[in-house]
Amino acid sequence: ETGVTQTPRHLVMGMTNKKSLKCEQHLGHNAMYWYKQSAKKPLELMFVYSLEERVENNSVPSRFSPECPNSSHLFLHLHTLQPEDSALYLCASSQGSASGRDNEQFFGPGTRLTVL
Amino acid sequence: QQQVKQSPQSLIVQKGGISIINCAYENTAFDYFPWYQQFPGKGPALLIAIRPDVSEKKEGRFTISFNKSAKQFSLHIMDSQPGDSATYFCAARRNGGYQKVTFGTGTKLQVIP
């Protein structure tokens, strides 16, 4: 596997279910991101992990719980979601540096989540 | 408050024509302006990017024009091809150890033969 991979690619869950999204990056990067992509809206940054520490949490409801066990893996644990949480969830990674310049984000293909 | 405004929402261009997508930003702290291309079933991929110290950057058929005083930038796709049909996102980033990128709402481009 190369680049950024995400599993599962599609997920349908009920509002009372608990599920997890997985992201793995094979690029040796030290920063990982979760985004939410909804139709006709900008990509919404949810969480950022830099060097395995959460450095950003953009007022995301607690029903979304991220986990970054190491620099290559990122999880998004889901519980008691709402139908409006249905969206494409994208993972990305980048190589952070002190200057922050030219550090392209590489995106995975996303998980299409449907909450019934 | 949306910090990067993108237009149009959708665009249909004849093969061989020029596709133009416009973006405007508000935050003067942004120092890097990438464009991403997203095909169905794929994540966004960096297409081309520009810094505010230059007014234009060209890579093949893709050109970014940047107007710092107006806080606007645009993507031009010359000789548009059906394979260019995708959703394009402009974005803006402020400097930092990790990337905090603000995206536009996207433009769905369809190039018809």
Image (tube, rainbow, N blue to C red):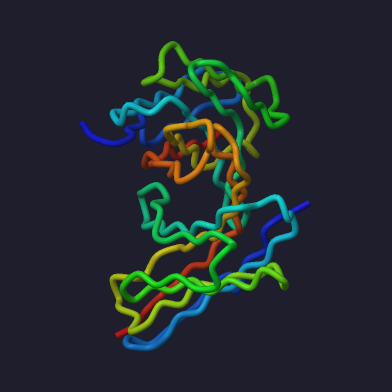
Q: Residue B41: percent from the left, percent from the top?
A: 36, 50
Q: Residue A100: percent from the left, percent from the top?
A: 53, 38
Tag count: 0
Residue, x 46% and y 59% (percent of image)? B49
| In the rendered image, the vertical position of residue A64 relative to residue A87, given as above or below | above
Place residue A22 in its image quadrant. Answer: top left
From the viewer's perspective, tell me whether residue A35 is left or right of residue B81.
Answer: right
Q: Residue A55: percent from the left, percent from the top?
A: 62, 23
| In the rendered image, the vertical position of residue B80 relative to residue A70, given as above or below | below
From the viewer's perspective, tell me whether residue A85 is left or right of residue A96.
Answer: right
From the viewer's perspective, tell me whether residue B19 is left or right of residue A36.
Answer: left
Q: Nearer the viewer, residue A10 or A74?
A: A74
The quadrant of the rendering that contains the C terminus of chain A is top right
Place residue A28 in its image quadrant. Answer: top left
From the viewer's perspective, tell me whether residue A111 is left or right of residue A64.
Answer: left
| In the rendered image, the vertical position of residue B46 relative to residue B95, given as above or below | below
Residue, x 32% and y 86% (percent of image)? B15
